[in-house]
């Protein structure tokens, strides 16, 4: 479902770390890249997973340095850590 150009850009941004990601994590990062941010609600729209699993994945992606967290609670959004350095 993801276009090859987006995948290649993510591989460039994250280099070898990208290869350790699973399909759901890649989908979340690709959406964050394309849409410039992502939140819990948006992940539920694109992936068929339990809401608590969404929270866990987003927290882990932030902890691992892929996403930067902005805000708290329901208003929390996430952006790619390197998006501000990457020319689209």
Image (tube, rainbow, N blue to C red):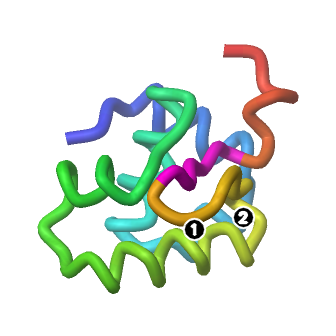
Q: Residue furthest top?
A: 88
Give whichever of 25, 43 is nearer the camera: 43
- 19 left or right, relative to 64: left
Quick one: quadrant of the N terminus?
top left
The residue under label 2 is: 16
Q: Main secondary structure of the magenta part?
A: strand
Which of the labelled discs sits on residue 72, or is there none? none
Give whichever of 22, 8 is nearer the camera: 22
Residue at 69%, 57% (x, y): give it: 69
Q: Relative to 30, say whether 88 is above or below.
A: above
Residue at 61%, 70% (x, y): give it: 61
Residue 37 highlighted magenta (yes or no): no
Separation (CA) of disc 2 from disc 1: 6 Å
Q: Report x, y in % for residue 5.
A: 46, 26
- 20 left or right, relative to 52: right
Residue at 73%, 54% (x, y): give it: 68
Numbered disc 1: secondary structure:
helix
Q: Relative to 32, say whether 25 is above or below.
A: below
Quick one: quadrant of the C terminus?
top right
**Local crowd at mark 1 within 10 Å, few (<14), some, or many (≥20)?**
few
Residue at 68%, 68% (x, y): give it: 62
Q: Report x, y in % for residue 12.
A: 70, 41
Callout 2 touching callout 1 (CB < 8 Å): yes
Q: Report x, y in % for residue 6.
A: 47, 32
Q: Which residues are magenta?
A: 75-80
Which of the labelled discs sits on residue 19, or is there none? 1
Q: Quadrant of residue 53?
A: bottom left
Residue 77 highlighted magenta (yes or no): yes
Q: Report x, y in % for residue 47.
A: 20, 61
**Local crowd at mark 2 within 10 Å, few (<14), some, or many (≥20)?**
few
């Amino acid at each position: 479902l993801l276009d090859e150009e987006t995948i290649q850009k993510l591989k460039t941004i994250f280099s070898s770390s990208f290869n350790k990601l699973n399909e759901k994590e890649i989908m979340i990062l690709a959406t964050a890249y394309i849409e410039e941010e992502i939140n819990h609600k948006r992940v539920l729209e694109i992936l068929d997973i339990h809401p608590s699993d969404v929270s866990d994945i987003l927290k882990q992606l932030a902890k691992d340095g892929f996403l930067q967290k902005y805000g708290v609670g329901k208003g929390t959004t996430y952006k790619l850590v390197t998006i501000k350095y990457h020319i689209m």
